[in-house]
Amino acid sequence: MHYFVLASDYDGTLATDGQVHDETIAALERLKDSGRKLILVTGRELEDLLRVFPKVDLFDCIVAENGALLYWPSSREEKLLGERPPEEFVKILRDRNVNPLSVGRVIVASWHPNETTVIQAIRELGLELQVIFNKGAVMVLPSGINKAAGLKAALDQLKISPHNVVGVGDAENDHAFLNLCECSVAVANALPMVKERADFVTNNSRGAGVVELIDKLIASDLEDLATEIKRHDILLGSKEDESEVNIKPFGTSILLAGTSGGGKSTLATAVLERIAEENYQFCIFDPEGDYENFDNGIVLGDSKREPSVKEVLDVLENPNQNAVVNLLGIPLKDRPGFFAQLLPQLQEMRSRVGRPHWIVVDEAHHLMPA
């Protein structure tokens, strides 16, 4: 399984006129039963969401206020990711008859055509705030706070990589979090620009579109879309006709073979650098210390100290870290045994969270002798 999380917008995606239909709720329950997690990513304030949607317990995490607030239904724990704008800002908006005006834990929200007054107040006070639009809604948030930032914070706490997430949405404030996800999906009623940028557009609208996506996700893990999603492809080089040679970032196996000194490790390093640039997680088995100065990974072990299976797994529990397993401290005859001990643990981890995305075995004859 590659996709372990579905991250969904609420209004216009899951919900129609603020309500989620029973068929959509049943599909969400099926997705949970498949072993996947659910994250709701919404511009709504938490209290408002809880009022209109009683099934929040279906979700592992709620990203509310357009990314400014995390809420964990199982524990009722909340975490703010930003500070509310100063009261002086809110007072100016009220004095200038901005209506409607909603003030959440962090977000300050209104509707078109009040954006002109809102932006003017921000300028007058010299505040570092941003205005985000969601169809007719006008949302004011601290700089850097959006749905992508909120989703990333939730995923970090769940220890899941965005590369193992499918996102679905419909409006302009969904662009950021959809772009973060490995697979971005627009429901059929989405704005044209959202559909244009999405990896996949459902045939159905709103909740029915989410049901369609969930059924496809459970049935095939979206395997049929893998060849169509090209924005994550890793560039290897070009052919004589200057056409690009790319590899898929997951589900791909590569064999680098050649004579000693022929550049195998150099090529592998170049590929790994590009994988690291795209934030895919890797674990390198390094028998000869060729990667001990590799900046993109945490080196475990050296010529004087053996690495342990536990410390490798501890490093990889964080989806933002890569491991370089230096085997110089392990006697040559014991290296296949260490490899045989660690590899099943990595495979188990993959079955649980979908990573490390790449397992690199350098000088394979050290670890898998004929």
Image (cartoon, grey):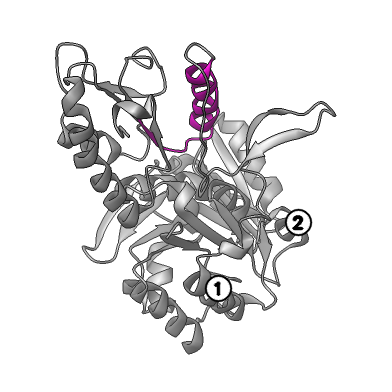
Residue at x-position 33% and y-position 56%: 351
Instruction: Work out which residue is located at the far right of the displayed protein and give it.
Output: 241
Residue 229: x, y in percent? 65, 52
Residue at image coords 46%, 41% = 85
Badge number at residue 216 = 1
Q: Residue 196 carries which label?
A: 2
Label 2 SS: helix
Residue 313: x percent and y percent?
Answer: 23, 39
The percent coordinates of residue 173 (x first, y second) are 61, 54
Residue 70 left/right relative to 109: left
Category of crowding for the residue at label 1, using alpha-carbon neighbours closer than 10 angstroms: few (below 14), some (14–19), many (at least 20)? some
Inspect the magenta stretch and tell me whether residue 224 lies in it. no
| Total numbered labels placed on residues in the image | 2
**Residue visible at 30% across and 21% down?**
287
| Residue nearest the viewer, comparing 15 with 295 | 295
Which secondary structure, mark 1? helix
